[in-house]
Image (tube, rainbow, N blue to C red):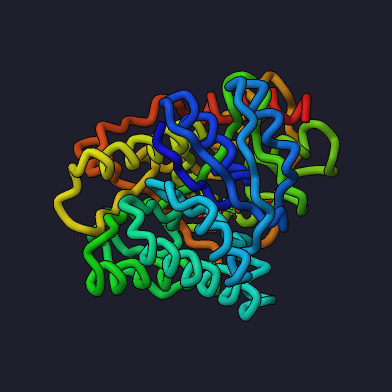
């Protein structure tokens, strides 16, 4: 079995990707410093797959600890790099912490990947690299926009790090995956989003409001130039997102990449507004959601959604789940977590 390092393996996307990797016959191990995750989530992964993935509690900024890890694991054949701080708002308040963690940590990781000539590297990038795109849907050739936050800029820098490294060395092949809005939970109801820090993304805020963990959802503005005045996003089910990572790994391992760096948008290819998401939650769960309209949130773009044609064509990847399934699975998880 091919040994795959998943950094951030205890996180939301990381843990769901561990499940998919195991089900596809890979041998994953995790590095996670647990700054925003609980290692116990690997018990949930084990409950689904029958395998307890080992996690090494290493901070990617600790150069020596990371180098020593790679000396012990010189049989790693691929890396999927999720580990990063990801709160847009927090990055505005603490930019240096975000640049240190997301950029310096990635430089340390890539140093080891280069020295060991690890053949496949997948980077967890983000639709936020596009900023406030003029044309929709955004395609992989849509140029970087002005980053709306330091978080988004660390993703732009991360992509540039990879392009510059690829130009300097031939040993590793790269895939950049630009996520739109990951949401939902595992079909089994045994795994889902379980951040240590308070949720700020829409779907967990909805389920917390519905179950009474918070008074209500505040819709951040209904005066945008969209069909119902609320912001439009491309929500992608976490299991479809995990599947895309395993398909991207297979794509690299089988040498199907034309260029040394290949980029893919991961969205479902259509926009859903905040108010439509609220109604989708109520319809798919039968629950009444307490919400009110509040002021706009600074930094929000009016609308962004993907063209995912390239991933469909080259990765043979097609998202299977819609916003109703996102809300149904997110609600099932909220009730048990
Ligand atoms: C979605 C919509 C809010 C909460 C973020 C990151 C992005 C990417 C995806 C990683 C917006 C509205 C939200 C609430 C609301 N992450 N909202 N009330 O900001 O689109 O994207 O996650 O790659 O980088 O920025 O996601 O879930 O915060 O917001 O009205 O309490 O829901 O205004 O329109 P966002 P989000």
Percent across and percent down for residue 237 are: 50, 34
Q: Is residue 86 left or right of residue 94?
A: left
Note whether 135 is above or below 13 in the view shown: below
Picture quadrant of residue 62: bottom right
Q: Nearer the viewer, residue 272 or 309?
A: 309
Quarter in which the N terminus is drawn:
top left
**Which residue appears at 48% of the width and 34% of the height?**
27
**Which residue appears at 39% of the width and 47% of the height?**
78
Note whether 225 is above or below 89 in the view shown: above
Q: Is residue 109 left or right of residue 96?
A: left
Percent across and percent down for residue 5 are: 49, 47
**Which residue appears at 25% of the width and 58% of the height?**
261
Q: Is residue 258 left or right of residue 190?
A: left
**Which residue appears at 62% of the width and 78% of the height?**
95
Percent across and percent down for residue 183 are: 56, 39
Outermost residue to the bottom: 96
Can the viewer see residue 195? yes
Note whether 225 is above or below 180 in the view shown: below
Can the viewer see residue 138? no
Quarter in which the C terminus is drawn:
top right
């Amino acid at each position: 079995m091919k040994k795959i390092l998943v950094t951030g393996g205890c996180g939301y996307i990381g843990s769901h990707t561990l499940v998919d990797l195991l089900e596809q016959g890979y041998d994953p191990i995790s590095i996670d410093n647990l700054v925003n995750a609980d290692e116990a989530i690997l018990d949930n992964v084990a409950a689904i797959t029958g395998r307890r993935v080992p996690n090494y509690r290493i901070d990617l900024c600790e150069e020596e600890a990371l180098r020593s890890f790679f000396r012990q694991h010189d049989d790693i054949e691929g890396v999927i790099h999720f580990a990063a701080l990801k709160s847009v708002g927090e990055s505005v308040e603490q930019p240096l912490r975000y640049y240190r963690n997301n950029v310096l940590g990635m430089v340390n990781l890539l140093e080891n990947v280069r020295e060991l000539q690890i053949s496949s590297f997948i980077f967890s990038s983000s639709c936020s690299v596009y900023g406030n795109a003029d044309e929709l849907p955004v395609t992989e050739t849509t140029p970087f926009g002005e980053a709306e936050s330091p978080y988004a800029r660390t993703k732009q820098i991360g992509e540039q790090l990879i392009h510059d490294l690829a130009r300097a060395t031939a040993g590793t092949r790269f895939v950049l995956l630009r996520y739109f809005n990951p949401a939902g939970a595992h079909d089994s109801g045994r795994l889902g989003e379980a951040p240590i820090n308070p949720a700020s993304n829409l779907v967990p805020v909805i389920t917390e409001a519905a179950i009474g963990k918070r008074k209500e959802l505040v819709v951040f503005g209904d005066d945008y130039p969209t069909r119902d005045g609320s912001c439009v996003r491309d929500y992608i089910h976490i299991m479809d997102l995990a599947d895309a990572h395993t398909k991207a790994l297979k794509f690299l391992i089988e040498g199907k990449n034309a260029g040394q760096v290949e980029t893919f948008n991961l969205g479902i290819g259509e926009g859903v507004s905040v108010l439509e998401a609220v109604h989708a939650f109520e319809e798919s769960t039968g629950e009444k959601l307490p919400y009110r309209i509040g002021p706009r949130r600074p930094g929000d773009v009016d609308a962004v959604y993907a063209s995912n044609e390239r991933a469909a064509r080259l990765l043979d990847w097609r998202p299977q789940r819609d916003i109703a399934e996102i809300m149904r699975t997110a609600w099932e998880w909220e009730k048990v977590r």
